[in-house]
Image: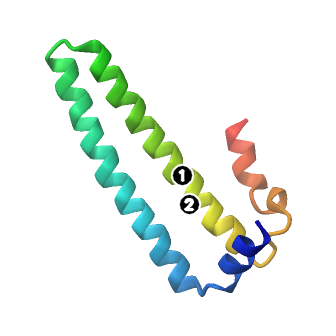
Amino acid sequence: MDTLTELFTSLSPGVKTLISAVVGFAALFFGGKTGIKAMAAFSDKNITEGLMFLGLTIAIGAISIILFVAIWGLAGDAGQDLNSEFGLLLLFLQ
């Protein structure tokens, strides 16, 4: 984990933004694709397949949010104490 932390802290802000944008576009593409499949399955009254694709869509969104927070959290100069950096975010999550 220390190697990963050192890698992200050594990146420039432009590279961090590029990685975040790639993660965001991948999440939009794959999440949108599975979301459309979920809507198509629900419209065909295939509930189990629709729920499966809906779950995949939610999982893709959650993974992209976790990756975004990890990239910017580990990349911060004060990344050792994530509670101080994300204290405001934690207030909204409670």
Amino acid at dot 1: Ile
Mark 2 vs 1: CB contact within 8 A: yes
Q: Position of residue 65 (x, y in %)?
A: 54, 52
Quadrant of the image for the N terminus? bottom right
Q: Is residue 76 visible?
A: no
Q: Residues within 10 Å of mark 1 (few under 14, many from 20)?
A: some
- Dot 1 falls on a residue whose secondary structure is helix
Quarter of the figure with residue 26? bottom left
Q: Amino acid at mark 2?
A: Phe
Please tell me the numbered disc located at residue 81: none
Quadrant of the rendered structure where residue 8 is? bottom right
Tell me if I can see residue 12 in this picture. Answer: yes
Q: Which residue is label 1 attached to? A: 65
Left or right: residue 76 compared with residue 19 = right
| Front position in the image: 18 or 85 | 18
Q: Taking 40 as reference, is 76 above or below it?
A: below
Residue under label 2: 68
Q: Position of residue 25 (x, y in %)?
A: 35, 61
Taking 86 as reference, is 22 above or below it? Answer: below
Q: Which image quadrant: the C terminus? A: top right
For marks 2 and 1, give the CA distance. Answer: 5 Å
Q: Is residue 8 above or below residue 61?
A: below
Q: Residue at x 74, y 46 (%)?
A: 90
Q: Residue at x 79, y 71 (%)?
A: 2
| Element type where label 2 sits in the image | helix
Residue under the point 58% across and 83% down? 13
- Along the line of sight, the residue nearer the viewer: 44 or 2: 2
Which percent across, then down, holds residue 68? 56, 60
Which color scheme did the rendering employ for the protein? rainbow
